[in-house]
Amino acid sequence: VYSSTCNSITMRKYDATLIYRICDDVGTIEVVETGGVRSLHFGSYPKQSSMAIAAPDKLLLSYCRAMMAWRLFLDDFDAALLIGLGGGSLAKYLLRHFPRGNIDAIEMRSSVVQVAYSHFLLPQDSRLNIRIGDGGEHIRQMAWHGSKRYDLLLIDAYDHAAMSESVDGPAFFDACRQLLHPICGDRRTPHLSRPLPISSRASTIKSCLSRLTAGTMLLLWGLLALYPNLF
């Protein structure tokens, strides 16, 4: 229960009704609601997540929709790694629309995970494995040990000021690239030891290039976000 003074301050800040607030070791976590939309804030105006109460799996924020650009290159995925859970918008969308996919999510704050479940309808799903920790360090460790590869990496680690320093720099994106499957064609098809017909070779080369481009796009997108004057 919050005092009327506390609630009125939040209403002025967000132009919305405060429905939940908690403070952890990192800072403030607030959930506000207005016009049928519930949003997650980290004590500042920028939204970390937004959910339409009538359509909880819909991607409301434009940057979340932009992060689905991987669908230009892949029809589906078996394994995805999500750095930064927030309210769970990306996780919910992937779970609903890609039923065969399994998702590993790394979130720095356990309080954020609790809020995603309690206020943003993140489902308890066996295909979603959430770990608490530093996403950048997790990726570097996985790349070092070479223990697992993914079809898809989604990096969503930021606050109101900038991307997390943990996911900054070329070394981080090199580690990301090491975690991506080196896919050429259908990964469920064993390596072909016989020559392919020209038409089949063209199709395989096109498929290979499209997936290589997907990995390259991840690197360029990340670098451009961090260093807009790089190119």
Image (tube, rainbow, N blue to C red):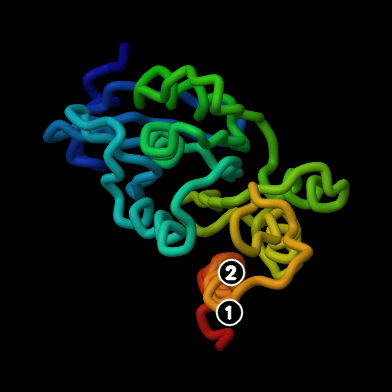
Tell me the mark number nearer the camera, choosing from 2 and 1: 1
Q: Position of residue 172 (x, y in %)?
A: 72, 61
Which label belongs to residue 204?
2
Q: Quadrant of the C terminus?
A: bottom right
Q: In the image, is 142 to the left or to the right of 120?
A: right
Count of numbered circles on the image: 2
Q: Quadrant of residue 208?
A: bottom right
Q: Is residue 106 above or below residue 228?
A: above
Q: In the image, is 10 to the left or to the right of 29?
A: left
Mark 1 Cα-neighbour bin, 10 Å: few <14, some 14–19, many ≥20: few
Q: Quadrant of residue 92?
A: top left
Q: Position of residue 127 (x, y in %)?
A: 55, 26
* Residue pointed to by mark 1: 198
Q: Amino acid at mark 2?
A: Thr
Q: Quadrant of the N terminus?
A: top left
Residue extending farthest bottom: 231
Q: Position of residue 162 (x, y in %)?
A: 51, 59
Q: Is residue 165 above or below residue 188?
A: below
Q: In the image, is 123 to the left or to the right of 111?
A: left
The residue closer to the viewer here, 12 or 45, is 45
The residue closer to the viewer here, 138 or 149, is 149
- Under circle 1, the secondary element is helix
Q: In this view of the protein, can residue 43 be seen by the observer? A: no
Q: Amino acid at mark 1?
A: Ile
Please give the name of the residue rendered at 33% of the width and 47% of the height, measured from the top-left corner. Answer: 45
Please give the name of the residue rendered at 58% of the width and 43% of the height, measured from the top-left corner. Answer: 80
